[in-house]
Image (cartoon, rainbow, N blue to C red):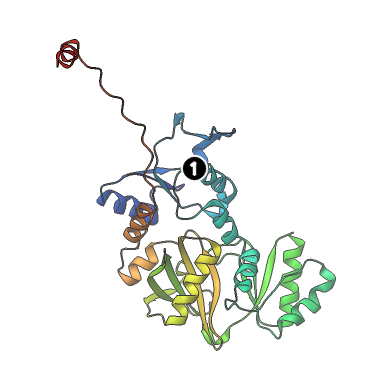
């Protein structure tokens, strides 16, 4: 089977592991830089080219689209979908997950637990907006930020107002959430593949830091999830329409709370902490979802004159 991985950097751990897992299973795997893919769009004529050559015969594509190229990368992925190529995460699902506000609205609409969240636009409403959230500390985060970037902890009301005003001055889209003190700087990364949580780890923030991202000094360890946490992670991925997702949860007095749903979760931290072959699970899931391509009927070989004469005499 021919698999493609949409990734800007073939040397990244996650990309390399997916290539390795695919080839170990006998598949042909190719890494495509989404920014080098270009397309023709016409009714019934969805074509894709890559570095001057046509892209055809790809059975499935695994998107590893970075946040900085979300718009173009999702357009490339959508073109593959229109060409009949299978993908575990559709372009629309990725766009939903990358928009934190939309994601939270959809999850809340399904009754999933979330940190209390507020969102507004007019500066005149800032005081009342923060009042809806309750007493500080408050967590202020960019709507489309990733990997902990653009996330600020404001420990008092004056700091919250200052950060909100600063973000508005930059015309940035952001939302404000309650701070879950009982989580104690830790969260759970649940790696969802299909209808299973194939691996989970607990990430603990470093000293003096409230963000638990591993590249910001967080420490990872394997964790055993309870039934509520598993159900919440699976439901969050389902609501977003993602077949492969990294669902981040907080343990709170109210039960598990969804912090974020990541459509391109990294593999290095989760595989290193748990020892689970997550890349292999992804490849197996993707391959299982590929529908056999319809083949044109074979033409009968023309009969030789001698064979035709024998049939006539008979």
Q: Is residue 187 rendered to the left or right of residue 310?
A: right
Query: Are there few (<14), some (14-19), or many (20+) residues within 10 Å of tag 1?
Result: many
Placement of 85 over or under 260, stated as above or below: above
Question: Mark 1 highlights which residue?
Answer: 80
Left or right: 168, with 294 as reference point: right
Identify which residue is drawn at 39% across, 62% down: 267
Tell me the quarter of the image containing the C terminus.
top left
Where residue 63 sits: x, y (%)?
A: 46, 51
Residue in the picture at 71% in, 81% down:
133
Q: Can residue 105 be seen in this view?
A: yes
Which of the two residues, 10 or 102, is positioned nearer the viewer here? 102
Instruction: Identify which residue, 279 or 88, lies in the foreground.
Output: 88
Q: In which quarter of the image is residue 85?
A: top left
Q: In this view, does 237 lie above or below 64?
A: below
Can residue 204 be seen?
Answer: no
Q: Quadrant of residue 31?
A: top left
Q: Give coordinates of residue 252: x percent, y percent.
A: 54, 85
Q: Under tag 1, what secondary structure?
A: helix
* In-image side of 186 versus 95 (left or right): left
Is residue 8 or residue 24 the one in the foreground? 24
Q: Residue placed farthest to the front in the image?
A: 314
Q: In this view, does 281 lie above or below 311?
A: below
Identified at 31% across, 67% down, the residue is 276
Residue 211 at x, y = what percent? Answer: 53, 74
The residue under the point 55% across, 73% down is: 259
Q: In which quadrant of the rendered image does the N terminus lie?
A: top left
**How far across and how far down the image is residue 50, in percent?**
46, 34
């Amino acid at each position: 089977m021919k698999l493609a991985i949409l990734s800007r950097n073939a040397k990244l751990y996650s990309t390399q592991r997916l290539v390795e897992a695919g080839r170990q299973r006998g598949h042909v795997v190719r890494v495509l830089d989404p920014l080098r893919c270009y397309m023709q769009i016409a009714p019934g004529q969805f074509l894709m080219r890559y570095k001057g050559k046509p892209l055809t015969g790809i059975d499935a594509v695994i998107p590893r689209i970075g946040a900085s190229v979300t718009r173009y990368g999702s357009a490339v992925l959508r073109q593959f979908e229109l060409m009949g190529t299978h993908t575990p995460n559709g372009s629309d699902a990725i766009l939903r997950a990358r928009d934190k506000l939309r994601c939270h609205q959809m999850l809340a609409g399904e009754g999933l637990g979330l940190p209390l969240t507020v969102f507004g636009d007019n500066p005149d409403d800032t005081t009342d907006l923060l009042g809806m959230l309750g007493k500080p500390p408050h967590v202020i985060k960019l709507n489309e930020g990733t990997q902990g970037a653009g996330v600020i902890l404001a420990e008092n009301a004056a700091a919250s107002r200052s950060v909100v005003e600063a973000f508005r001055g930059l015309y940035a889209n952001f939302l404000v959430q309650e701070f879950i003190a009982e989580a104690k700087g830790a969260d759970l990364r649940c790696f969802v593949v299909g209808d299973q949580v194939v691996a989970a780890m607990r990430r603990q923030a470093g000293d003096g830091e409230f963000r638990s991202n591993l590249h910001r000094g967080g420490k990872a360890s394997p964790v055993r999830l309870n039934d509520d946490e598993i159900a919440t992670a699976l439901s969050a991925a389902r609501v977003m329409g993602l077949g492969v997702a990294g669902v981040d949860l907080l343990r709170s007095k109210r039960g598990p709370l969804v912090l974020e749903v990541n459509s391109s979760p990294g593999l290095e931290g989760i595989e290193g902490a748990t020892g689970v072959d997550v890349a292999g699970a992804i490849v197996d899931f993707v391959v299982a979802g590929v529908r056999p391509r319809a083949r044109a009927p074979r033409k009968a070989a023309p009969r030789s004159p001698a064979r035709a004469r024998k049939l006539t005499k008979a």
